[in-house]
Image (spheres, coloured by chain):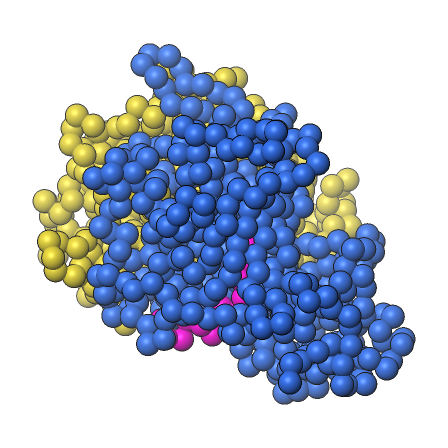
Chain colours: A blue, B yellow
Amino acid sequence: MALKSFIEVSPDSHFPIQNLPFGIFKPEPASPPRPGVAIGDYVLDLSTISVSGIFDGPFLSGSDCFLQPNLNKFLALGRPAWKEARAKLQNLLSADVATLRDNPSLREKSLVPMSKVEMLLPIAIGDYTDFFSSMHHARNCGIMFRGPENAINPNWFQLPIAYHGRSSSIVVSGTEIIRPRGQGHPSGNSPPYFGPSRKLDFELEMAAVVGPGNELGKPVDVNEAGDHIFGLVLMNDWSEIFKHGNTCLSGPFLGKSFGTTISPWIVTLDALEPFACNSPKQDPQPLPYLAEKISKNYDISLEVQIKPAGQEDSCVVTRSNFNHLYWTVTQQLAHHTINGCNLRPGDLLGTGTISGPEPESYGCLLELTWNGQKSLSLKGATRRFLEDGDEVIISGCSKGDGYNVGFGTCTGKILPSP
Amino acid sequence: MALKSFIEVSPDSHFPIQNLPFGIFKPEPASPPRPGVAIGDYVLDLSTISVSGIFDGPFLSGSDCFLQPNLNKFLALGRPAWKEARAKLQNLLSADVATLRDNPSLREKSLVPMSKVEMLLPIAIGDYTDFFSSMHHARNCGIMFRGPENAINPNWFQLPIAYHGRSSSIVVSGTEIIRPRGQGHPSGNSPPYFGPSRKLDFELEMAAVVGPGNELGKPVDVNEAGDHIFGLVLMNDWSEIFKHGNTCLSGPFLGKSFGTTISPWIVTLDALEPFACNSPKQDPQPLPYLAEKISKNYDISLEVQIKPAGQEDSCVVTRSNFNHLYWTVTQQLAHHTINGCNLRPGDLLGTGTISGPEPESYGCLLELTWNGQKSLSLKGATRRFLEDGDEVIISGCSKGDGYNVGFGTCTGKILPSP
């Protein structure tokens, strides 16, 4: 019998009782931020639930993890605590349980309409790492910048490639993104162009949120990596298109650090478990430290819309799926720690642009327009790259049997360079 | 008349009254960490000084910035507060002022022998960025990996190249460093080598510590960048030598994130002011956003010693100087924010390996042994790269007229891979 909440939840809601993603919110502008869980069109305030003594299990009883301004303390407690919270919350919100359902004053304090709250970053992010785990994206970029013969470096198939990103410029969905200025390439003897970026792009990604970390010097076994991952968010890794030539050491630096947007609700791996699926066959076989006994990917439908500056309607520009990724999130995590690097609760591991095999599923304008050679038609506007005033809306959802487990949206609007 | 402390300070001490670097320490193992300032062979406990009401100026009176477990709150207050603290501390420690000198109980509480304390990381580091600002280092690496004709990419002279580093694995001097494991390159059809790193190196660097930050979207003007820098530390950017071929997007990832060591005492730019000197002429002229009215470098003598495993004595392997750097710390900071990226108090900006023009001043074993082609002779041991049990000791000092302003040491010993 399907689990059902006493809260009215429409069939196409992203937030049924089967989901219960975690976020940080303010019920009123002057309130301190606190943890919450999404249910239908409401946010359940975990600080008031916590204070009422409802979390009485071995891991959460007496804990102040839901009285913090971010989720890091809860993340650090690990899977046993997360499972205990989930079980308690599903019980509390169940149509068949009176505890909250029949307590008007607790309901009044604890259930806030989602349309009235302000969502904040759900975590304090100590380090953000961006991977490059879609083969289709890697190949398309390689063809564009190096030619078809050198499309993908053989190294790409040996290990999940990644670079360190900038933590300070990660913002929550809805934050406006200011077009960066920067240098172009020197051409001949002229000084390089300096001014507003001329090729601004979105990148459709997701990111894994790290739970318990590991000590410096002590790698995480790939078969235990799943217990270090709390859940996933949507991510827009806004990019200024650059090419640093052959300078290996530069990596993506200024081209990314002007802003990175994440969705506010962290969907747990527990909620995604019914949507686990096989990941693509890996060839060559990965080295032993990356060889998982169970290799899990997730069926999450992803969509990007653009609302061009000055227009009322948005247009879908791409439809992709998380399961296009070649490297799994557990392989990425294990690889990240293989040299002894220490992860910490709240760290973010981006997947890289999630492109599928077909053009309709490419995850960024660079690929969709083939580096500006084609233009996209958006109901009365055409686009090669983003223009000032454009809004990008990323959404993601796993479709279940009578319910969806969704991520809400990850949005941002481009403002002009100052 | 030279300023002199009532504390006995030997003429070659790194910590005379002209220095007064800031750090975080524990007087006893069970004490909470608190800010301190180095003076001679003592640490002045700023938490006890603060509680006694001695900081009575407009910026620090009533502030709890010296009651924190890290210096970030003090850093955020900016140069007016730092100058006020410095003036008060120089007054307090002066041989001519009775306040502390003649107060035995306050001296008892506030002055702790340096040999007895535990030093911790002085800051909580939100983001760590590593630059590549020595032309000599860039040229040597280029010659080794790309050949003399392509030694330095012309781009290198247009902007200070940098990449994001890993914050979580930054440790304080004295922390043991565990040899990382990792993959080598695939060769032919064989799987790549996987095991303990075979080319482990040190890198002689320094790092600027950021004070007040800037808002996302609002770059820092290069002529104001100095007010965003609190001071400098020594840094050992331990490296596993890797070459990622032409994969621009990977940057240095696993090759660095197993550990990065910094010295515990942050020497302020105010203390270094007498050692300011001209920076090298920049050619081509930098773009306007990098063109400083006043271009400052600093004369800081740097030395690296290695104590080979099992030996009693250490040997000097290189002598360099901070003033070999092509790009200044203020240019690095301004460049970092030019796209709108936001810096935060406690951020760390590494200079990159500080090599001078001569082989005796190369800043890492990669250059000193020319990628292992030569070996170094260390009094009975020979080395190409670091071996288990080796200890690396970096020290730095500016020699003044009758006093030194020094950084102490930045040390680490290599332990074997588990």
| Residue A162 in sight in this render | no
Quadrant of image for the N terminus of chain A? bottom right
Residue B276, position in %: x, y?
A: 46, 27
Residue A133, position in %: x, y?
A: 38, 54
Q: Nearer the viewer, residue A132 or B100?
A: A132
Q: Nearer the viewer, residue A89 or A254?
A: A89
Q: Nearer the viewer, residue A386 or A86?
A: A386
Quarter-of-image position of residue B124: bottom right
Total marks shown come to: 0
Residue B120, position in %: x, y?
A: 50, 60
Image position of A215 with respect to B260: above or below: below
On screen, residue A365 versus residue B37, left or right, reads: left
Q: Residue at x 18, y 59 (%)?
A: B192
Image position of B71 with respect to A218: above or below: above
- Boundaries of the magenta span: A222-235
Which residue, as the protein is rendered here, is positioned at the far right?
A105
